[in-house]
Image (cartoon, helix red, strand yellow):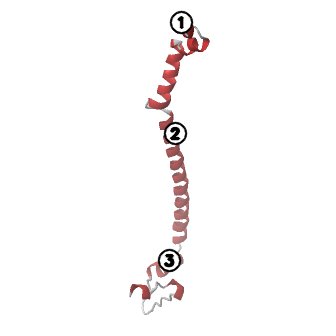
Amino acid sequence: MKFSEFKNKKWVKTVSNKYLLIIILFFVWMFFFDTNSFFIHNELNNEIDNLKENKEFYKGEIDHDKSFIEKMKDSNEQEKFAREKYYMKKENEDIFLIEHQDSLKNKGKNE
């Protein structure tokens, strides 16, 4: 098979078309090598999704904290919170902490 016969085949003419080659080169460049390539867009879209999830989580936390602040405006709730969380007491009052057996750490392992 001679080169001229090979050159005259239809698929060789199509593939060797300079406009087609330029278009293919352009798409390969844009898809893989450009600073705005498909892979970078994909990473950025994933980051946006993660940030949206974080935004929803923090909105929920803000709502929870707002309800806690509203609850703490009541002086009885403040006293209850201080007693439970920080073991505060009134004068002439004793506090007894009751720990259940299953909540204690195994002391035998550390000895």
| First in residue order: circle 1 vs circle 2 | 1
The mark found on residue 33 in the picture is none
Q: Which x, y percent locates residue 32? A: 47, 31
Residue for point 52% across, 41% down: 45
Give the labeled residue for mark 3. Answer: 81
Q: Which x, y percent locates residue 10? A: 61, 11
Q: Which x, y percent locates residue 55? A: 52, 52
Contact flag, marks 1 and 2 (Cβ < 8 Å): no
Q: Quadrant of the C terminus?
A: bottom left
Q: Quadrant of the N terminus?
A: top right
Give the structural element (helix, strand or loop) at label 1: helix
In the rendered image, which quarter is residue 15 located in? top right
Give the labeled residue for mark 2. Answer: 42
C-alpha span from label 3 to label 1:
92 Å
Give the structural element (helix, strand or loop) at label 3: helix
Name the amino acid, label 3.
Answer: Phe
Give the labeled residue for mark 1. Answer: 4
Q: Nearer the viewer, residue 15 or 4?
A: 4
Decide: is 58 above or below 32.
Answer: below
Q: Residues within 10 Å of mark 1 (few under 14, many from 20)?
A: few
Decide: is 77 above or below 94.
Answer: above
| First in residue order: circle 2 vs circle 3 | 2
In this rendering, the label closer to the viewer, 3 or 1: 1
Name the amino acid, label 1.
Answer: Ser
Q: Is residue 100 visible?
A: no
Q: Specify the farthest residue to the left.
A: 111
